[in-house]
């Protein structure tokens, strides 16, 4: 592993000679598979490593004493940036300036550079010759590599100012500092090193840097590399994937970080082509343009191998990626996978509404594309009837919401398919409705179990509230109280309201318990009853606490500070109810909007 090239744990190690060490540089080492590359299969990292003194690492009593008494404290001082402590140790033993102080043969400069100690490095360089900066650790890395791996641009700058030749010394695995900067995801460092090193690396490493930039979200640098080296658009990594394949798997990179309401507003006010493009979107656009300029066989090969890039993006809901490709190459809508499923069939199977909703914009072609049947004779409604992918499934309290979403999904797809498809049977002899029932049997049972448990618990609470409030109301009516005072009137009214709300909540939850739990009940009836019951219970608890506060206030005549304090604390149970039930309330009320807006326009059109 490349990351292992920066081991810095201090520990004694026997001295070994490695002046003849050669690092092979192959395509696989860089994560690039370039069949047309004319670069040499291997090249030496360096004629010889410049090894620091290894005296403190020898297996002898004196060496071990020096190591534990001086090297370990010096290592700690370098990591913590304690220059005063380090300078005292090095004044006592000047050989430690250029000696290995860790088992990885790292000098104090290696350690400080990797620990991002800028001031420490500046002070240390005053005591070092520029050739001392060329000392390499056991992996062949100079201190510059440690600064690059840490992403500390100021340290890298002062090291190169001291010795510009550091850029010519390739480190561990024969890779440039630029490769390490991209590999560790340090964008500022990579942008700083790019103009200094890009022309020195071969084609294989250049591709590795390009893929590392995409993997780590360094899209600005990747875009710059693509403009400088357009051939990178069709280069493949060790897995046979192109840059398009990597971007297809990053839907979050294209997402606008804003609320749904603001997002819909932006889309409604802005044409797709005029949207503010992120570096990732710009990179995708340039990549796709470069690919389209290739001959037809190359374009198809990039799209289909090793896996279909369009279908990969569709499965992950990467709408902007799909929109970019389809917008420039509309014929891709006719592409099918090994099962004869188009991208719209795959969008249905993976519940990607934003992509499937665009089928409405295809005009006459819609009926043709949606009429495809796969190798198991499933039409597109059969695919909508299947259970959502495992990564989208919810269990427990959200199984009810999941059932509602799946029902909404099935219902919406049914609206746009040919009428004959509704009763069409697949190779197993199942109609779409029969397939839906069998696929969702477990989810239906989970939803029923959770709904029953929730309704029973809430029924008990609402019944207790109603009983207590009814008893309080009867007690007041039978007693002799000054009914003209404001606190007493508040007590009477709030008690009556709380009682009626609690009774209504009890009846609502009872309706849930006696429900048939048919599939269509999850679409509207059960959901509305649960929301109404929870809302009634909330307002009942609120009114009950007002009743309690007014009763306490009446009992103490409102003159005691303690009575006022207790009255003020009456809101705590209400807040506690909201806090504890907020996740459930949020999911249930949000499901109403999400299920009714599955196919509403929230993205720019594909074509």
Image (spheres, rainbow, N blue to C red):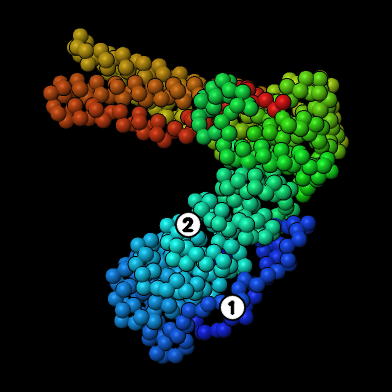
Q: Quarter of the image containing the N terminus?
A: bottom right
Mark 1 neighbour class, 10 Å CA radius: few under 14, some 14 to 19, many 20 or more: few
Helix, strand or loop at disc 2?
A: loop
Kindly report the distance in space between the C-alpha atoms of the residues bearing marks 2 and 1. 27 Å
Nearer-the-camera pick, 469 or 340:
340
Q: Which residue is mark 2?
A: 151
Q: Position of residue 570 (x, y in %)?
A: 28, 28
Q: Earlier in the sequence, mark 2 or mark 1?
A: 1
Is 383 rendered above or below residue 301?
above
Q: Position of residue 136 (x, y in %)?
A: 52, 73
Name the residue located 42 percent from the left edge and 57 percent from the top edge: 154
Name the residue located 54 percent from the left edge and 64 percent from the top edge: 167
Is 82 rendered above or below residue 559?
below
Whether residues under marks 2 and 1 lie with C-beta atoms below 8 angstroms apart, the answer is: no
Name the residue located 51 percent from the left edge and 25 percent from the top edge: 262
Q: Which residue is mark 1?
A: 48
Q: Residue furthest top?
A: 484
Name the residue located 53 percent from the left edge and 56 percent from the top edge: 193
Task: Give the mark toward the camera: 2 or 1.
Answer: 1
Q: Residue 422 is drawn in which quadrant?
A: top right
Q: Is residue 411 visible?
A: no
Q: Position of residue 299 (x, y in %)?
A: 79, 42
Residue 125 appears left or right of 508 = left
Q: Is residue 531 visible?
A: yes
Residue 438 appears left or right of 137 = right
Q: Position of residue 26 (x, y in %)?
A: 70, 65
Mark 2 neighbour class, 10 Å CA radius: few under 14, some 14 to 19, many 20 or more: many
Helix, strand or loop at disc 1?
A: loop
Residue 336 appears left or right of 74 = right
Nearer-the-camera pick, 332 or 298:
298
Q: Residue 591 is drawn in which quadrant?
A: top right
Nearer-the-camera pick, 263 or 354:
263
């Amino acid at each position: 592993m490349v990351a292992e090239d920066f081991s810095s744990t201090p520990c004694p190690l026997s001295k070994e000679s490695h002046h003849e060490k050669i690092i092979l540089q192959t395509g696989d080492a860089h994560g690039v598979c370039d069949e047309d590359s004319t670069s040499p299969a291997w090249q030496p990292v360096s004629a010889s490593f410049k090894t620091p003194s290894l005296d403190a690492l020898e297996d002898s009593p004196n060496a071990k004493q020096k190591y534990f008494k001086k090297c370990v404290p010096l290592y700690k001082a370098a990591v913590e940036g304690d220059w005063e402590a380090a300078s005292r140790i090095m004044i006592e033993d000047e050989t430690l300036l250029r000696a290995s102080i860790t088992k990885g043969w790292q000098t104090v400069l290696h350690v400080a550079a990797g620990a991002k100690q800028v001031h420490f490095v500046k002070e240390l360089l005053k005591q070092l010759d520029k050739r001392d900066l060329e000392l390499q650790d056991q992996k062949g890395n100079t201190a510059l590599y440690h600064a690059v791996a840490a992403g500390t641009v100021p340290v890298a700058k002062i090291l190169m100012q001291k010795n510009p030749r550091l850029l010519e010394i390739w480190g561990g695995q024969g890779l440039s500092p630029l490769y390490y900067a991209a590999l560790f995801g340090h964008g500022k460092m990579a942008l700083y090193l790019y103009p200094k090193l890009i022309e020195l690396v071969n084609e294989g490493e250049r591709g590795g840097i390009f893929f590392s930039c995409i993997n780590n979200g360094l899209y600005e640098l990747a875009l710059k590399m693509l403009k400088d080296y357009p051939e990178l658009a069709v280069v493949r990594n060790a897995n046979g994937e192109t840059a398009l394949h990597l971007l297809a798997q990053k839907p979050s990179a294209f997402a606008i970080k804003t609320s749904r309401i603001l997002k819909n507003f932006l889309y409604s006010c802005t044409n797709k082509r005029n949207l503010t493009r992120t570096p990732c979107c710009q990179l995708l656009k340039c990549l796709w343009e470069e690919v389209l300029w290739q001959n037809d066989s190359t374009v198809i090969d990039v799209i289909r191998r090793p896996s279909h890039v369009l279908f990969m993006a569709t499965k992950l809901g990467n709408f902007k990626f799909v929109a970019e490709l389809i917008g420039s190459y509309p014929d891709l809508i006719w592409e099918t996978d090994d099962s004869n499923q188009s991208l719209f069939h795959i969008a249905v199977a993976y519940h990607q509404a934003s992509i499937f909703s665009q089928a409405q914009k295809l005009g006459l072609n819609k009926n043709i594309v949606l009429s495809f049947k796969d190798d198991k004779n499933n039409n597109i409604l059969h695919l909508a009837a299947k259970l959502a992918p495992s990564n989208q499934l919810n269990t427990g309290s959200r199984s009810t919401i999941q059932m509602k979403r799946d029902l909404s999904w099935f219902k919406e797809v049914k609206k746009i398919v040919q009428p004959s498809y509704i009763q069409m049977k697949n190779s197993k002899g199942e109609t779409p409705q029969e397939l839906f029932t069998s696929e969702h049997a477990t989810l239906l049972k989970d939803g029923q179990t959770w709904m029953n448990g929730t309704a029973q618990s809430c029924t008990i609470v609402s019944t207790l509230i109603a009983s207590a409030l009814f008893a309080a109301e009867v007690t007041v009516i039978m007693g002799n109280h000054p009914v003209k005072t404001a606190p007493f009137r508040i007590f009477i009214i709030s008690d009556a309201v709380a009682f009626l709300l609690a009774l209504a909540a009890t009846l609502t939850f009872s309706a849930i318990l006696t429900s048939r739990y048919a599939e269509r009940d999850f679409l509207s009836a059960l959901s509305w009853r649960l929301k109404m019951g929870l809302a009634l219970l909330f307002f009942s608890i609120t009114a009950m606490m007002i009743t309690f506060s007014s009763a306490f206030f009446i009992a103490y005549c409102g003159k005691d500070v303690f009575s006022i304090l207790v009255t003020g604390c009456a809101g705590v149970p209400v807040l506690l109810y909201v806090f504890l039930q907020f996740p459930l309330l949020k999911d249930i009320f949000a499901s109403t909007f999400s299920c009714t807006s599955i196919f509403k326009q929230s993205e720019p059109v594909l074509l």
